[in-house]
Amino acid sequence: PAHDRAFARATEAWELIPGAARLLAAANDGAAQSRGPRLSRLAAGLLAASVALVVALGGVGAWLTRDPVYTTAVGEQKVFTLSDGSRVALNTGSHLVVDFTEAERRVRLDHGEAMFEVTKNPDRPFVVQAGEERVRVLGTTFTVRNDGRKVAVVLVEGRVEVTRQTPRQKKAVPVTVLAPGERLTVRADAGAAIDHPRVEAVTAWRRGEMMFDGASLIDAAAEFNRYGGTQVQVGDPALAALRLSGVFQTHDPAEFARVAAELYDLQVDREGDRLVLRRRSA
C-alpha cells in the first residue's frame, strides 16, 4: 500500500540512528476518530493552548535526573542520544532543552525541527513542549517543527492524542487523536488543521533533501533559506504564487533557482550572497 511505501522511505531517514527502524505495532484502530467533528474542536480550543508531546510507551528506561541543552547552527544537522536511550535528530537552527526527572522526561523545542525515537517507559512519560500549544503523543516516531508562527506535529508511526491546556487550566483536556501519516498544524492566526502530507517529504531533511509537491515559489525559497549560505529571493511579487514540484538537495539553492527559472522562463541574477529570480528582460 502507499502508506507502507511511504513509511519504508521514512525509516531510511534514521540510517544514522541504530535500531530506529524497529517501530511499535500500529496503534489501536479504535483510537481513530472521524476527522470533521474533531477539527472543529481543534479550531475552537487550540488557538490559545500550549503544546507538548507526551509519549507514553511500554518498557524500561533509565532513571536519570537531567540532560543538557542540544543545539544546531544554521545549516547544521545532528543526532543525539538522550540519557534514557531516546534518540533525537535536530534539523538546521534548532534549540532543544532537556530536563529529565525520575517522574517525567521533558524536553522543550524552543525553535527548529526535530525527529524523535523514544525509549519505552510507561511509568515515565516523555513530554515535548513546543511554543504555546500542547499535544499528547502515544507512539514511537514523530517529528515536531516550531518556527515561531506555527507548530506542526507529524506522526510517522504509533498514536498521537492532542490535548488542550491553557495557563489557567490545571489539567489537559483531550481534543483529538492523530493517526499515522497525519499532520497537525497549529497557527496563532488561523487555528488548527489536520492534513495528510507525504511522510517521505516531511522527513526528507534527514536525507539531505527537500521534496516539494506543488509548493509556492516563495515558500520553497524560504525552505532553502533556512539552511543559510546563498539565499534565494523572489524579486517580483507576481511570481511568489507560482507552483513547483521536485526533489532538491538542501544545500544546493543554485540548482533550485536554475530549475525554477527554466520552468517559468525566468532569469537568475546573483547579487552578493543572493540569487534573485525575476522575469526575463525584454
Image: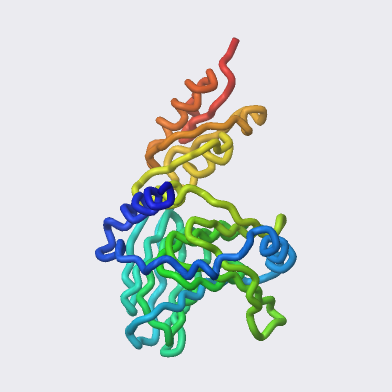
Would you say 42 lies left or right of 226 here?
Answer: right
Residue pictured at 59% horizontal, 70% vertical: 162
Q: Nearer the viewer, residue 155 or 186?
A: 155
Q: Quadrant of the C terminus?
A: top right
Would you say 131 lies left or right of 29 here?
Answer: right
Q: Position of residue 57 (x, y in %)?
A: 41, 78
Q: Position of residue 229 (x, y in %)?
A: 42, 42
Q: Position of residue 65 (x, y in %)?
A: 39, 87
Q: Is residue 75 visible?
A: no
Q: How many marks?
A: 0
Would you say 143 lies left or right of 282 here?
Answer: left
Would you say 150 lies left or right of 108 here?
Answer: right
Q: Quadrant of residue 172?
A: bottom right
Residue pictured at 38% horizontal, 82% vertical: 121
Q: Nearer the viewer, residue 282 or 100?
A: 100
Residue pictured at 41% horizontal, 64% vertical: 141
Residue pictured at 41% horizontal, 89% vertical: 102
Q: Is residue 32 above or below residue 76?
A: below
